[in-house]
Image (spheres, rainbow, N blue to C red):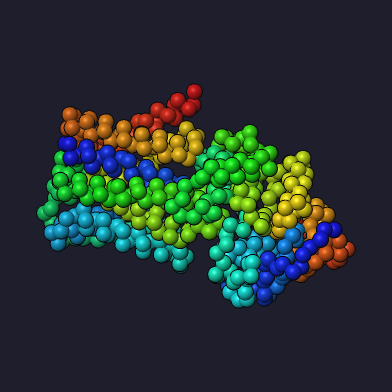
Amino acid sequence: MQHVDHAHTIIELDRVCFSYTNEEVIKDVSLEIHKGDYVGIVGPNGGGKSTLLKLMLGILKPNDGTVRLFGSDIKDFKDWSKIGYVPQKTYIEINFPVIVEELVAMGRYGKQGLFHFPTKEDKEKTLTALKQVDMLGYKDRQINDLSGGQQQRVFIARALATEPEIIFLDEPTVGVDIKTQKQFYALLRKLNKELALTLVLVTHELDVVAHEATELGYINRTMEYYGNPEEFLKGAYFHELIGRGGLHH
Amino acid sequence: MIRGFEAGIIIAVIAPLIGIFLVLRRYSLIADTLSHVSLAGVAIGLLLKINPLIAAIIAAVVSSVAIEKLRISKRIFGESALSIFLSGSLALAIVLISFAHGFGADLFSYLFGSINTVKQSDVYIIGALGILVVAAVIAFYKELVFVTVDEEAAYVSGIPTKFINILLIVLAAFTVSLAIPIVGVLLISALMVIPVVTALQLKMSFKKTIFFADLISVFSVITGIILSFYLNLSPGGTIVLVALGIFILTLFIKRR
Ligand SMILES: Nc1ncnc2c1ncn2[C@@H]1O[C@H](COP(=O)(O)OP(=O)(O)OP(=O)(O)O)[C@@H](O)[C@H]1O
Ligand SMILES: [Mg+2]
């Protein structure tokens, strides 16, 4: 177990409710995520995991309740360079004309601000991020010439290039082979331990995340469990989740 | 014909520049919609005896903002909102034209483009707004690219996505209405789409794709204007056929 500095709250959700249509898909969710936490979010398909991430990021606005990021209300939040986001299997259009280096460089755009062109430093940070995910050799390849796992690593590099304090990952290892998956989780562990990077990871790989994460949330409309991963494995939700076939894809 | 060349080359440069963002966001229908709105603008202009080009620009820009607002409100599904605008403005144009029946030859040139009737004042308008469009794309290049690749990730990077969306559609409105004198209402979207789709076949970086799309577009317009001048053909149609020829050629080259 690693040391978690509970003095530093990064995300605070207070009785958050959300609905796309009439039906509430997130109900009364409250939680706190602290600096250095490695949070795994699990739950059945349609349980609201992606929606929860989008609420934390301000992409969606809650119908009720409040979301606070780094101490400020999400509506007033400006410090986007602290945030990295790897969306759920980004649909990359066939023929989308972007090469790996261009895509990762986008992670620097927010930091640069309007009317600023990329500097030498931006270029260096971009290449460093590619090195971190072991994809430097592919920097001039078009993104759709890569395998699914390689693409996913490039999207992680984009989040790393921002040099964020927290990274949100939505099912980042879907379609990634076992070996790459292992490397990927080793990378996350390293980032979490060495850089004290806070991680929020949505996944169906309960077996893995229970051993990697420091906190585990089980969401099925409401946050039915939030706390120690090992406790969770012993509890009833675990069996419910497996029963619904949520463990594997 | 010199005036036609000047205006044509400006249009050739800006059409794919905006077109690439529309194509990649699957917004190609917007170009068609705005061109029909522009036609209604032209009809109003001819009726009220104000410069039809200016009337077309105003109509297109106002509608583009309205279309974007409708899209955000999500009350009407994107595609059907566009169809409503497209058929609505076409209906308005037809009614206005039949109401003032008799501006026949003029209208024909707006439908299909006519290099010979490009006025000097048109060249100034096209030049000034063309430079504005290019400048805006350069200034907001990285934001436009990021929002096109992944709007939510762009938002989370602090990019003002709402503003960029409005900017793109207003720039599209300018481009479409400026292109009317050259290729005409019915063929504008072809000039915005075909060179882009051709360049996409080559699988290059984003910057190179834009560069090649522009190259193809400028080549098509110059060749099209020269051919149409000497063979006495419709310039709009000839330009689009040249661009289409290049597209088919790249398909064959890629196949081998
Ligand atoms: N854009 C949308 N409009 C309407 N309903 C939506 C939308 N996105 C998601 N939903 C609904 O909200 C609920 C939660 O969806 P969400 O994508 O958050 O689930 P999830 O836990 O991420 O599922 P998965 O494991 O399949 O990724 C689902 O019932 C889904 O149908
Ligand atoms: Mg999801």
Q: How many marks?
A: 0
Q: Is residue B106 above or below residue B225?
A: below
Q: Position of residue A1 (x, y in %)?
A: 85, 58
The N terminus of chain B: image quadrant: top left
| Quarter holding residue B229 | top left
- Residue located at (68% from left, 50% from top): A172
* A194 vs A175, nearest the viewer: A194
- Residue located at (15% from left, 58% from top): B50
- Residue located at (39% from left, 48% from top): B137
Q: Position of residue A192 (x, y in %)?
A: 75, 54
| Quarter holding residue B231 | top left
Q: Is residue B100 left or right of residue B171?
A: left
- Residue located at (75% from left, 61% from top): A37
Q: Position of residue B236 (x, y in %)?
A: 25, 40
Q: Is residue A184 left or right of residue A143?
A: right
Q: Is residue A129 left or right of residue B83?
A: right
Q: Is residue A95 above or below residue B126?
A: above
Q: Is residue B174 above or below residue B197?
A: below
Q: Is residue B247 visible?
A: yes
* B180 vs B111, nearest the viewer: B180
Q: Is residue A23 visible?
A: no
Residue furthest out toward the left: B102
Residue furthest out toward the right: A234
Q: Is residue B36 above or below residue A179?
A: below
Q: Position of residue A144 (x, y in %)?
A: 57, 39
